[in-house]
Image: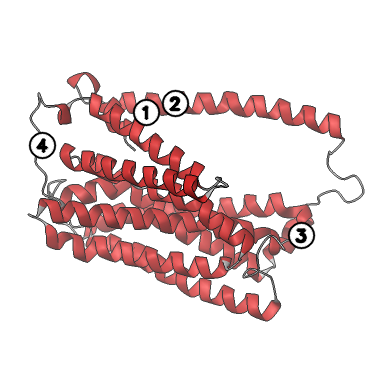
Amino acid sequence: MIFSPFFAKLGGHVSVTRSVAFGVVLLCIALIMFVAYFFMDKKLDAQTGEAEEKDDPFKISDIGKILSDSGFWLVALLCVLYYSAIFPFQKYAVNMLQCNLTLTEPAADSFWASNTVTIVQYVIMLAVAATGFASNFQKKIINQYLLLGLSIVALIVYCYMGYMRQSEESIFAVFPLLAVLITPILGSYVDHKGKAASMLVLGSMLLIACHLTFAFVLPMFKGNTMGGVMVSYLTILVLGSSFSLVPASLWPSVPKLVDAKVIGSAYALIFWIQNIGLWLFPMLYGKILDMTNPAGTAATELDHTVPLVMFAGLGVVALLLGLVLKAIDKKRNLGLEEPNIK
């Protein structure tokens, strides 16, 4: 989020090609890592003998058992609704901020307009992530709070720098930072206390609140730079935290709904269903944006209200499905509200 604009603007001439090339480099690194992992995994199977079970191998008919389970479909639909309201939003979020915030570009020769500030912000983001993540694994309480405090201070410094840069992309890049802090905490809570289904309901409520805030509250602060940026930061951070509820509570719930033998197929089907939403909703957002704005409207003057309400609607449906899932869990005793560690 923070480096794509950096590479696009590098050298004074704006070109998206450089950002795409940066993404290709990351994908090449990931491919190399996957190939290395493949051979390491194959070697481990040979050493331990833990290959696929010969007595009860996977059959195509097993997929039918997964698809006939109502609990699986509820989790799959919750997944597609969550992700469809998050990832497509990221595509349009910076433009939404451009249309609602009143920012003034810093002087071209100042530190805040330089490429250096992007590097500094990224280092601070790493500090937020590293200290926040490490705080979850400290045995001494004083060390835990010390690292957590350092992480919060680094987060505040990052937000201050984003404000000083008067940059929409820098403001939105704060999105994953609070999630970095709380995801391990939420995962640990689900392991020891449970309440996964309740977390899904809470995540849906936060999702609805955030998109409605972007749609109706943020436009009220147009002309108020400080107020608009503060509302943006708070809403973006809460939206990121709601997103962290998904991996912490939804994914660990899948093994409680399907047989262990078909767990890989179940996850694959969920991702397949999820990708349908990731194809559909960016297109819908763009179509609705075109339909609700007069032809020729400047890119920084677009009204994002209606498509944002669409995302809030996805949250409403997710909330209803979450409540249904809680009811089914109580009726069928699936154990979704039970701790993973007993």
Image position, residue 42 (x, y; %): 77, 29
Q: Secondary structure at mark 4?
A: loop
Residues at marks 1 and 2 touching, judged by CB atoms closer than 8 Å:
yes
N-terminal label among 4 and 2: 2
Quarter occupied by residue 53 = top right
Residue identified by numbered label 3: 259
| Residue that appears at 72% across and 63% down | 342
Residue 183 in the image: above or below residue 78 = above
Of residues 198 and 323, which is closer to you in this image? 198
Of residues 289 and 113, which is closer to you in this image? 113
Quarter occupied by residue 308 = bottom left
| Residue that appears at 16% across and 31% down | 112
Q: Nearer the viewer, mark 4 or mark 2?
A: 4
Q: Is residue 290 visible?
A: no
N-terminal label among 4 and 1: 1
Q: Secondary structure at mark 1?
A: helix
Neighbours of disc 2 within 10 Å: few (<14), some (14-19), many (20+): few
Q: CA distance from mark 3 to mark 2?
A: 37 Å
Question: Mark 3 belongs to which amino acid?
Answer: Asp
For the N terminus, the quadrant is top left
Q: Residue furthest top?
A: 11
Residue identified by numbered label 1: 20
Residue identified by numbered label 4: 105
Neighbours of disc 1 within 10 Å: few (<14), some (14-19), many (20+): some
Q: CA distance from mark 3 to mark 1?
A: 41 Å
Residues at marks 3 and 2 touching, judged by CB atoms closer than 8 Å:
no
Q: CA distance from mark 1 to mark 2?
A: 6 Å
Residue identified by numbered label 2: 24
Q: Is residue 76 visible?
A: yes
Image position, residue 13 (x, y; %): 19, 22
Question: Mark 1 belongs to which amino acid?
Answer: Val
N-terminal label among 3 and 4: 4
